[in-house]
Image (cartoon, rainbow, N blue to C red):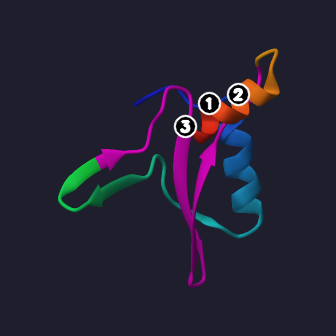
Amino acid sequence: MAAKDRFHTIVRIALEKEQWKITDDPLRLDVGGTKFEIDLGAEQLLGAERGKEKIAVEIKSFLSDSPLTDYHAALG
């Protein structure tokens, strides 16, 4: 398992406080028979559900001297 983003735990706790149930941490996907683990360096994707709602959350930090560079790197 890859390292978690520095805000991973904070986001997870905030979701749980809003009654979201964490279902996957990290979220693994199977698309067209190809399996993916969404895991890019220090980022993590987690899945949560509340009632019939489901979400996937990717946590990213913008910590370099250039937030714009971080933003473009996050978008891929």
Q: Toward the viewer: 60 or 50? A: 60
Q: Mark 3 = which residue? A: 76
The quadrant holding residue 29 is: bottom left
What amino acid is found at the position of numbered circle 1 in the picture?
Ala
Q: Position of residue 46 (x, y in %)?
A: 53, 52
Say if 30 sits above or below 3 in the image: below
Q: Mark 1 = which residue? A: 73
For the C terminus, the quadrant is: top right
**Residues at discs 2 and 3 in contact (Cβ within 8 Å):** no
What amino acid is found at the position of numbered circle 3 in the picture?
Gly
Say if 52 sits above or below 68 in the image: below
Q: Where is residue 71 in the image (x, y as percent from the top left)?
A: 71, 35
Does residue 65 appear to the left or right of 55 in the view shown? right
Q: Mark 2 = which residue? A: 70
Say if 60 sits above or below 19 in the image: above
The residues tagged by marks 1 and 3 sit, at their Cα atoms, a distance apart of 5 Å
- Please name the residue shown 67% across and 50% down the image: 12
Is 42 colored magenta in this rendering? yes
The residue segment tinted magenta is: 36-63
For the N terminus, the quadrant is: top left
